Image (cartoon, rainbow, N blue to C red):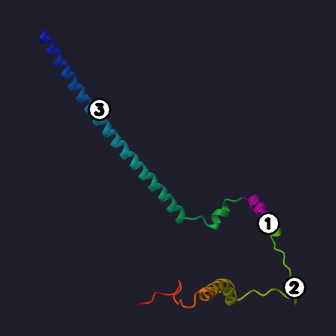
Amino acid sequence: MGASAREIERQIKETRDRMDDNLTALEGRAASSAARYGRLAAIGLVVVAAGGAAYFIYRRMRRPTLKDRLDGLSVEKLRSLAEELSGRVKDELPSVTVTVNEKTEREPGTIESLLRKLAPALVGTASTALLDRVSRPAGETDGPYSPPQAD
């Protein structure tokens, strides 16, 4: 019985070794196939990107001229386009009002507009400084906004 048990163990070990070898070979093939497909996908992506770039450069360099664009239009399309444009022009004319000798509000100049914007800030700063100066006790000379003095 001992000999047959050893024989069975040996066969099991050989079978396991063969299976391990087969699995290792299959894993190696799968990895190489994945790498190959990855390379093919990368090459395909580069080719598509290069083709797209070439197409855009071609279109940028060779823009259709007015003559080329007009050659594709038929007489009926040109007539309908002219009617549409004349309709737009008639609808979009602005109304104009002319007044003579009428007093209008004068637009402020550059300096006046700057003063209008800066005046509230200047008045606020000056009033804060004045209130700080007035509200300080008589003997105190250092306010919260004065620089520190050396001893």
**Residue placed under numbered mark 3 in the picture:** 26
- Position of residue 60 in the picture relative to residue 2 (left or right): right
What main secondary structure does the magenta stretch of the protein show? Answer: helix
Cα gap from disc 2 to disc 1, whole angstroms: 28 Å
Q: Is residue 101 left or right of residue 140?
A: right
Look at the numbered disc 2 and give the secondary structure of its residue: loop
To which residue does mark 1 refer? 88
Circle 2 Cα neighbour tier, 10 Å, few/some/many (<14 / 14–19 / ≥20): few
Say whether marks 3 and 1 touch (CB < 8 Å).
Answer: no
- Residue 141 point in image, percent of width and height: 53, 90
Numbered disc total: 3
Q: Magenta stretch: residue 83 in it? A: yes
Residue at image location 53% in from the left, 86% down from the top = 143
The answer to which of 110 and 114 lies nearer the viewer is: 114
- The residue that mark 2 highlights is 99
What secondary structure is marked by label 3?
helix
Circle nearer the N terminus (2, 1):
1
The disc, 3 or 1, on the residue closer to the chain's N-terminal end is: 3
Between marks 2 and 3, how big is the CA–CA gap?
A: 93 Å
Which marked residue is nearer to the observer: mark 2 or mark 3? 2
Residue span colored magenta: 74-84
Name the image quarter holding the C terminus: bottom left
Rendered position, 92 above or below 114? above
Q: Which is in the foreground here, disc 3 or disc 1?
A: 3
Mark 1, Cα crowd under 10 Å, few <14 / some 14-19 / many 20+, is: few
